[in-house]
Image: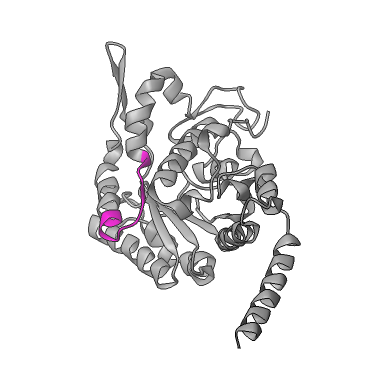
Amino acid sequence: MKKIYVSVLISLLSVFVTASLFAAPLTSAEVVVIGGTDAGVYAAGFDSDYNATEKRAKHLVQRTVAEASELYMAGDSIMADYRPQEWPQYGWGQSLKSFMKNPERLHNFARSGWSARRFRESGRWEKCIASKLKPGDWVIVSFGHNDMNKRRNKPPKNDYSTIDEYKAFLKGFAADVKSKGANIAFATSIAHSKGFSEKDGVMTVDGGATGLGPYVAAMREVAAEVKAPLLDLNRYAEENLPKLGMEKAKALYMFVKPGEYANYPKGKNDAAHVRDLGAFFYAKGAVEMARIHDATLKDFFKTPSCVSFVPSIE
């Protein structure tokens, strides 16, 4: 009986080793998961001093889980993708692609001008995100700028929500995501540049300016209640923009001089939206916070300090 057991074990081990050795090559991004280099992993795989089969098996499992996960985004114009003819306006969700180990796993469904209410009631949430979720996936939700607009309270732009309604929409998103075995993170709205001020050469940022404060606070409360990671971009702005100073901080937003860019011959003074450099600034902040909050969320991203800003179009 013992001989039969040993024989079967050897046969199974032989099949596993063969499959492991001829598996698809590992990418540098995948190797980071176990903290080695390509050379280090392959050396370990063929060095008699290591348990090659065990090392390879663990890595294959990690790679399979990582490759199966997708990252979805639901939000407004601050997160959305923009067309080349709208450059240099950019969304931080669009810039997030630069930080992804595998950009094809990022699905940004944010829409300019949309609120949590419209995202839910239009069917976009169900069609584009909820119906596609599988265990291990992640969703980042970021609303607030349009939800507070009391003038947009009827179709086709029915965006306004009271604080209680806003919180209910966020909790609904969380419930849907968790029912699929997936994960959700919330990202607070970025600071409006009308909240920038300077006195005696010292800059301060009021992230709650223009009425945004209660909606930012509501998202923080919901994230804590449903135990979801919070990417607090609003606080990130308050803490980090003053380090840049007023001039450089405002340069992150869509303040464009006439003739400066072909897409805006008359210029543009937009205190709410960011240009490509601003999108990069906030995307980097989101990644830095994501890497702290959760190991599986962290696995989507490169090390932020290793990513450099590159203008999309010159």
Residue 299, placed above or below residue 65: above
Quarter holding the N terminus is: bottom right
- Residue at the image point whose x is 68% and y is 69% from the top: 16
Res 158 visible: no
Q: How many marks?
A: 0
- Residue at the image point whose x is 72% and y is 72% from the top: 15
Residue 212, placed above or below residue 66: above
- Residue at the image point whose x is 43% and y is 18% from the top: 247
- The percent position of residue 297, horizontal first and vertical second, equals 47, 52
Find the residue positioned furthest to the bottom: 1
- Residue at the image point whose x is 24% and y is 46% from the top: 214
Q: Is residue 66 left or right of residue 16?
A: left
Choose between 144 and 68: the one closer to the eye.
Answer: 68
- The percent position of residue 252, horizontal first and vertical second, equals 48, 28
The residues colored magenta run: 222-233
- The percent position of residue 232, horizontal first and vertical second, equals 35, 43
Quarter holding the C terminus is: top right
Choose between 92 and 84: the one closer to the eye.
Answer: 92
Choose between 304 and 65: the one closer to the eye.
Answer: 65
Residue 37, placed above or below residue 129: above
Q: Is residue 283 left or right of residue 142?
A: right
Q: Is residue 63 left or right of residue 284?
A: right
